[in-house]
Image (tube, grey):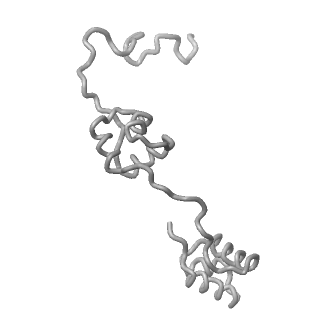
Amino acid sequence: MEAYSVDLRGKVLAAYDRGMMTKEIAKAFDVSSSWARRVRQRRREHGELAPRPRIGKHHIKIDRVRLAGLVRGQPDATLAELRDKLAITCSLSAIWAAIDQLGLSFKKKRSTPRNRTAPTLCSRGPNGSSGGRGSTRAA
């Protein structure tokens, strides 16, 4: 997200100087009331009009094209497996954010036939029955 321009900040501060109220300024310039107050506060406390510099470095470590290929090649890979295959050092949440930005999904589709040797769920009784006492008292 880009910072608002110095020109807009100047117009907001000029509106304050003319005596406009914060809500009126926010509506007139299509900004939030809290942002307008912070601009005025920054001028009052620091004498500055320019936006604050971004803190921290923003490095993109993950090769999005390669990640997309890995996910399409092995859609059931875990985030840790994908990170190992990319051979990078980053958090699993960074891998997930990159996958989400690419619009990919980890939803697995049933690609194998049902198990013929044993049921996958244990049945305790007829469908809809919990197998235990009901939730109402017996008369």
Please tell me which residue lies in front, 62 or 4: 62
Q: Residue 32: horizontal and vertical position, in percent?
A: 59, 71
Q: Seen in the image, is 20 located left or right of residue 86?
A: right
Residue at 35% x, 36% y is: 107
Please tell me which residue lies in front, 94 or 11: 94
Q: Seen in the image, is 111 located left or right of residue 48?
A: left
Is residue 137 visible to the viewer in this orientation of the structure? Answer: yes
Is residue 28 visible to the viewer in this orientation of the structure? Answer: no
Q: Seen in the image, is 82 located left or right of residue 109?
A: right
Residue at 55% x, 75% y is: 4
Kindly give the residue lying farthest to the right in the view shown: 45
Q: Residue 13: horizontal and vertical position, in percent?
A: 65, 84
Please tell me which residue lies in front, 24 or 130: 24
Kindly give the residue lying farthest to the left in the view shown: 113
Q: Residue 116: horizontal and vertical position, in percent?
A: 25, 12
Q: Residue 134: horizontal and vertical position, in percent?
A: 52, 15
User: Where 57 falls versus 13 (above or below)?
Assistant: above
Residue at 75% x, 79% y is: 44
Residue at 37% x, 37% y is: 85
Please tell me which residue lies in front, 89 or 137: 89
User: Where 61 falls versus 57 (above or below)?
Assistant: above
Q: Seen in the image, is 114 located left or right of residue 89?
A: left
Q: Quadrant of the C terminus?
A: top right
Kindly give the residue lying farthest to the bottom in the view shown: 18
Residue 5's image quarter?
A: bottom right
Total marks shown come to 0
User: Where 133 falls versus 18 (above or below)?
Assistant: above
